[in-house]
Image: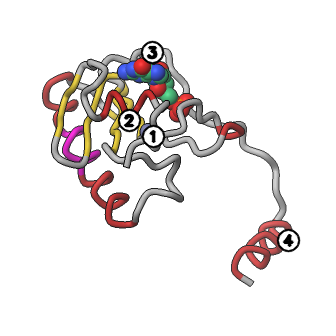
C-alpha cells in the first residue's frame, strides 16, 4: 500500500533515488538528507504507515532487528562509539514526514549534537498518580 503524495513511499520504492544502505522486500534504509551526524540513516518500510501506531506489530519487530544490524555496521565501518534511535510520532512530537521512519543516529566523541529533553521535577506522589492514571 502506497500513498500517492508521500515522498517516503516514492523513496522506499525506488521512484526517487536515495543513498541506499540496505534494501529488502519490506524495507529500505537510506541516508538522511539533513543528517545530525555522519551516517544518520532512516529505516523506511516500503508500505505506507503514517506512524508507529499504524505499523503492524510484526513489522515493528522487524524494524528493531534491522536497526540492530545497521548500527553494528556503523560501529564497524564508521567507528561510532554510540548511537541514538529516534522515532517521532505526530507533529507535536517533531514528526515532519508522515510515513513511519526510524532514525539511526551514530554518535561520535564531541560530535556537537544533543538529543534529549529537559528533566522536570516530579514528586513521588505525582509519579504514583500518573502510574495509576496509566495502569490503574
Ligand atoms: P522526522 O522529523 O519526520 O522524524 O524526520 C524526517 C527526516 O527526513 C528529517 O531528518 C529529514 O532530514 C529527512 N528527510 C526529509 N526529506 C527527505 C528526503 O527527501 N530524502 C532524505 N534522504 N531524507 C529526507
Ligand atoms: Zn508513504
The CA distance from mark 1 to mark 4 is: 46 Å
Q: Which mark is residue 9?
A: 2
Q: Which residues are magenta?
A: 66-72
Give the mark nearer the N terminus: 3 vs 1. Answer: 1
Q: Position of residue 135 (x, y in %)?
A: 69, 80
Pointer 2 with pointer 1, Cβ within 8 A: yes
SS at mark 1 in the image: loop
Q: Nearer the viewer, residue 98 or 84?
A: 98
The CA distance from mark 2 to mark 1 is: 7 Å
At label 1, counting other C-alpha atoms closer than 10 Å, the crowd grade (few under 14, some 14-19, many 20 or more) is: some
Q: Nearer the viewer, residue 70 or 95?
A: 95
Q: Kindly identify which residue carries mark 1.
A: 3
At label 4, counting other C-alpha atoms closer than 10 Å, the crowd grade (few under 14, some 14-19, many 20 or more) is: few
Q: Residue furthest bottom?
A: 136
Nearer to us: label 3 or label 1: 1
Q: Is residue 33 left or right of residue 89?
A: left
Q: Is residue 68 magenta?
A: yes
Establish whether ligand 1 lies closer than 8 Å to the Cβ of label 3.
Answer: yes
| Quadrant holding the C terminus | bottom right
Q: Kindly identify which residue carries mark 3.
A: 34
Q: Is residue 71 left or right of residue 126?
A: left
Pointer 3 with pointer 4, Cβ within 8 A: no
Q: Kindly identify which residue carries mark 4.
A: 125
Amino acid at each position: 500500500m502506497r500513498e500517492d503524495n508521500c515522498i517516503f513511499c516514492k523513496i522506499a520504492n525506488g521512484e526517487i533515488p536515495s543513498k541506499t544502505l540496505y534494501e529488502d522486500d519490506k524495507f529500505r534504509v537510506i541516508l538522511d538528507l539533513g543528517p545530525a551526524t555522519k551516517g544518520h540513516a532512516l529505516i523506511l518500510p516500503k508500505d505506507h504507515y503514517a506512524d508507529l501506531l499504524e505499523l503492524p506489530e510484526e513489522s515493528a519487530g522487524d524494524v528493531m532487528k534491522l536497526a540492530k544490524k545497521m548500527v553494528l555496521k556503523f560501529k564497524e565501518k564508521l567507528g561510532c562509539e554510540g548511537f541514538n534511535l529516534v522515532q517521532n510520532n505526530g507533529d507535536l512530537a517533531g514528526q515532519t514526514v508522515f510515513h513511519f521512519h526510524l532514525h539511526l543516529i551514530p554518535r561520535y566523541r564531541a560530535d556537537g549534537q544533543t538529543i534529549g529533553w529537559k528533566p522536570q521535577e516530579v514528586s513521588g506522589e505525582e509519579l504514583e498518580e500518573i502510574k495509576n492514571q496509566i495502569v490503574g
